[in-house]
């Protein structure tokens, strides 16, 4: 009897000890570290990259390049922006950035009055340098420090040359652009026109469209009705290439047409791979991001003042559907 | 010695200590967790404060712009101060994860305050348009602040998400831990209590058993208790009591036996007294008869017989009266002569008796019947067995303050070892003594009478004879007389 009691209690003690230890190790396990708080205002340089087209392949690359460079320069950089070219949201982000007194703003240029006012008046008022990237806005209108990105005029020319090379020196070319043209679109168009004007056999039909898919589709429809003999299409706004090709494909075969656009559209690369696009103008988004951070830091640290107001241009080249480079 | 009290104290204090430690541990841990959660909650509250303060400022600014009185001015200044304080608090919330956002946030507040100030300035300078514009901007910034608060909060939640989950898990685990510890302590306590109670009750049981044994009269079983507390002390005392009782019982038993023996010896004494009374009748009767016979013999003309009878009667009377008394040497010598008369009548020519007596010695006191038994011994051993008879010489002479009595016979002598045995009182032969008193008796009585040893010595040569020498002091201390008389 006595032994039984002692044995029973001993077993219970062993079991409970085990459970207690297991429970204790779980309960007293050190919690994961909280982020280290920075009590003092460490004034590291804060940069913001603002774009209208977050989460597009092109801008992701720009962001990636910018972040890489920021890490190298040991500055903080965040990518802000709006989705699907939401201008209001974009401008709001811009305003927040200005009011937040960041040390530099790298922005996708937007050729609107509101944007110009923000960059020209507000940013200047707070003394914040603004650099445009990929899409430029002329310096006299925006007071931007510099522009980092492709030579859009040259890019337009490059596309035009490619077109002539493939289509020949005669034919009807339909050019689709925005109703309200941004500065970079004007440059591209100017580049294209600059080349094509030399060939009197080539007819150019330029048409603006609203930014919605339906509008693009209906505009394409109209254009094809008006110029049934057109053999080439150029989408100055790369985002319009998708709906445009969709509409063409609905009517007839896509292959016979020479269709060109730029690489800053959402679908550009995939359409090229599918062979629906004959060529896209490839830019260097990563380099753009990298360069923009580099130059804005040069300006902030006072190494290079002033920056070239013409901008620092990055390479462009033509990508065709069969992978050839011109 | 660990007393029972101390045992109880020990048990209770150890338990209290364990409980205390556990309680303190859990409390400490809880406090830590609480502090962590408090810190986090405070972060949120502070951020919320920013929103509230900025909105309040906008309201106050609006009020002031609509009605630029002193009261509203004070109000707006107050709310600007508030928001600046809040801004300082928020600055402390910066950490690795949110440094960028919080910096922006702080600058936004700056912008808000600046814009508000500008608005006030314009208002004071009556530039209503500018003031209006600045107010609108301030309002927008305030909105941005609200939005950013949400963004930062969201980010905080994301950052702390894992941390919160861990806190929740740990508090769950802590609950379990509490239950397990409770059960563990309960089990340990039960075991300790069991052992502890056993350590008290076991000796008590042993003691009870021992008490039972005692009650049933078994006193010789040792009481043993294996413990070291009061019970052990009790058991020890109890054991001592048992030993004492045991001793007492033995003593009583011995006494009872002694009493029994005493009783028996008393009875024997009574019997012997009775016997001696009975035997006393005979000597008196015999004595009277002997006297009558002596007279008759005298009247009948047998004078010799008559004398003999007188001697016998005298000897008998002496024997009867003087056995426990001291007499003078003269009386003793007289009786000796009477005895020798009788023996001469018996042995006629075979017995020669010489006596040389220094009469100046005859006044000393000696125990009665001292010489007669020795003479009788000589007669028995030296005359009776010899056909030709023998000689017995008796001398009393003085040697300084000592009186020496010598009894010499011409018998076979006594072997040396027998002499020693006789003198040391280990051999006695009473056979054939007329007075019933042997050699031993004489030696002992002399010793007692004078209080001195070795008063009697024996010289013997085998085949030639034996000489018994009695040496007594002329004077003796009277004290010893009493003892002899009593005996």
Image (spheres, helix red, strand yellow):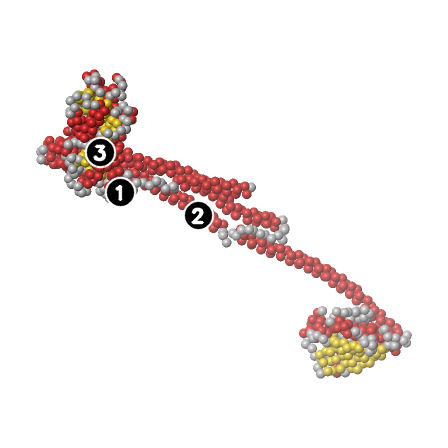
| Residue tagged 2 | B13
Q: Is residue A166 above or below residue B316?
A: above
Q: Residue furthest right?
A: B300
On the image, the x and y values in percent for residue A3 come to 55, 43
Q: Is residue A216 above or below residue B374?
A: above
Q: For the residue carrying disc 1, how many other residues have a C-alpha within 10 Å: few (<14), some (14-19), or many (20+)?
A: some
Q: Nearer the viewer, residue B118 or A291?
A: A291
Mark 2 Cα-neighbour bin, 10 Å: few <14, some 14–19, many ≥20: few
Of B127 and B315, the residue lying toward us: B127
SS at badge 2: helix
Q: Which-is-in-front pick, marks 3 and 1? A: 3
In which chain is the residue bearing label 2? B
- Marks 1 and 2, Cα distance to the nearest angstrom? 48 Å
Residue drawn 90% across the image and 76% down it: B301
Asked whether the beta carbons under mark 1 and mark 2 sit within 8 Å of each other, the answer is no
Residue B360, label in figure: none
What residue is at 78 percent from the left and 82 percent from the top? B357
Identify whether A128 is placed above or below B209. Answer: above
Q: Chain of mark 1?
A: A
Could you say whether the residue bearing mark 1 is in a helix, strand or loop? loop
* Residue B421, horizontal then vertical, whole percent: 75, 71
Residue A204 placement: quadrant: top left
**Distance Cα–Cα, label 3 vs label 1:** 41 Å
User: Any mark on residue A38, and which?
Assistant: 1
């Amino acid at each position: 009897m006595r032994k039984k009691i002692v044995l029973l209690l001993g077993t219970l003690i062993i079991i409970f000890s085990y459970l207690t230890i297991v429970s204790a190790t779980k309960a007293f396990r050190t919690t994961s570290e909280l982020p280290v708080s920075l009590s003092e205002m460490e004034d590291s340089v804060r940069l913001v990259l603002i774009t209208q087209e977050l989460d597009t392949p092109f801008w992701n690359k720009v962001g990636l390049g910018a972040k890489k460079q920021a890490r190298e320069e040991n500055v903080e950089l965040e990518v802000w922006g709006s989705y699907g070219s939401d201008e209001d949201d974009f401008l709001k982000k811009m305003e927040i950035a200005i009011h937040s007194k960041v040390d530099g703003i790298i922005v996708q240029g937007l050729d609107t009055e509101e944007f110009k006012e923000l960059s020209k008046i507000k940013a200047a008022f707070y003394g914040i340098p603004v650099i445009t990237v990929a899409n430029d806005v002329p310096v006299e209108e925006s007071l931007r420090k510099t522009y980092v990105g492709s030579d859009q005029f040259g890019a337009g020319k490059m596309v035009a040359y490619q077109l002539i090379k493939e289509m020949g020196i005669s034919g009807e070319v339909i050019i689709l652009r925005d109703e309200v043209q941004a500065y970079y679109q004007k440059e591209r168009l100017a580049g294209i026109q600059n080349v094509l004007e030399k060939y009197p056999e080539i007819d150019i039909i330029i048409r603006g469209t609203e930014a919605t898919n339906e509008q693009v589709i209906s505009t394409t429809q109209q254009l094809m009705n008006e110029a049934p003999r057109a053999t080439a299409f150029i989408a100055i706004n790369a985002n319009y290439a998708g709906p445009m090709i969709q509409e063409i494909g609905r009517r007839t075969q896509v292959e016979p047409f020479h269709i060109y656009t730029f690489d800053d559209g959402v679908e550009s690369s995939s359409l090229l791979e599918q062979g629906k696009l004959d060529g896209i103008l490839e830019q260097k988004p990563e380099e753009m991001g990298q360069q923009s951070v580099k130059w804005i830091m040069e300006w902030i640290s006072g190494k290079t003042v002033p920056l070239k107001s013409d901008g620092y241009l990055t390479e462009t080249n033509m990508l065709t559907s069969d992978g050839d480079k011109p | 010695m660990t007393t029972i009290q101390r045992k109880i104290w020990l048990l209770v204090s150890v338990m209290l200590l364990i409980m205390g430690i556990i309680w303190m541990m859990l409390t400490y841990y809880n406090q830590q967790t609480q502090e962590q959660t408090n810190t986090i909650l405070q972060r949120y509250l502070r951020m919320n404060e920013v929103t509230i303060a900025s909105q309040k400022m906008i309201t106050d600014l609006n009020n002031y712009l609509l009605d630029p009185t002193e009261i509203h001015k004070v109000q707006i200044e107050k709310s600007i101060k508030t928001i600046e304080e809040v801004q300082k608090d928020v600055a402390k919330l910066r950490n690795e994860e949110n440094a960028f956002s919080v910096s922006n946030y702080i600058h936004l507040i700056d912008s808000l305050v600046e814009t508000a100030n500008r608005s006030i300035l314009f208002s004071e300078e009556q530039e209503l348009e500018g003031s209006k514009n600045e107010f609108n901007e301030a309002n927008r910034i305030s909105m941005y602040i609200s939005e950013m608060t949400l963004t930062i909060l969201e980010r905080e939640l994301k950052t702390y998400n894992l941390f919160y989950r861990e806190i929740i898990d740990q508090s769950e685990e802590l609950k379990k831990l509490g239950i397990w510890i409770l059960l563990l302590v309960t089990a340990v306590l039960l075991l300790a209590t069991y052992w502890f109670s056993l350590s008290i009750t076991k000796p008590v049981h042993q003691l009870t058993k021992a008490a039972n044994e005692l009650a049933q009269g078994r006193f010789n079983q040792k009481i043993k208790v294996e413990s070291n507390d009061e019970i052990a002390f009790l058991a020890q005392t109890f054991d001592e009591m048992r030993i004492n009782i045991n001793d007492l019982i033995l003593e009583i038993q011995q006494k009872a036996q002694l009493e029994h023996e005493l009783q028996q010896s008393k009875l024997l004494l009574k019997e012997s007294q009775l016997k001696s009374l009975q035997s006393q009748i005979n000597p008196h009767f015999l004595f009277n008869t002997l006297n009558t016979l002596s007279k008759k013999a005298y009247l009948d003309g047998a004078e010799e017989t008559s004398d003999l009878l007188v001697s016998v009667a005298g000897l008998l009377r002496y024997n009867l009266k003087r056995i426990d008394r001291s007499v003078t040497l003269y009386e003793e010598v007289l009786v000796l002569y009477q005895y020798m008369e009788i023996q001469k009548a018996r042995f006629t020519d075979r017995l020669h008796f010489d006596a040389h007596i220094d009469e100046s010695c005859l006044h000393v006191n000696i125990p009665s019947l001292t010489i007669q038994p020795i003479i009788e011994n000589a007669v028995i051993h030296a005359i009776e067995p010899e056909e030709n008879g023998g000689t017995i010489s008796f001398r009393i002479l003085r040697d300084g303050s000592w009186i020496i009595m010598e009894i010499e016979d011409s018998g076979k002598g006594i072997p040396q070892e027998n002499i020693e045995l006789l003198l040391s009182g280990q051999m006695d032969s009473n056979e054939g003594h007329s007075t019933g008193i042997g050699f031993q008796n004489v030696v002992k009585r002399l010793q007692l009478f004078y209080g001195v040893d070795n008063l009697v010595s024996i010289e013997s040569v085998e085949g030639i004879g034996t000489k018994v020498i009695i040496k007594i002091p002329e004077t003796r201390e009277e004290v010893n007389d009493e003892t002899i008389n009593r005996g």
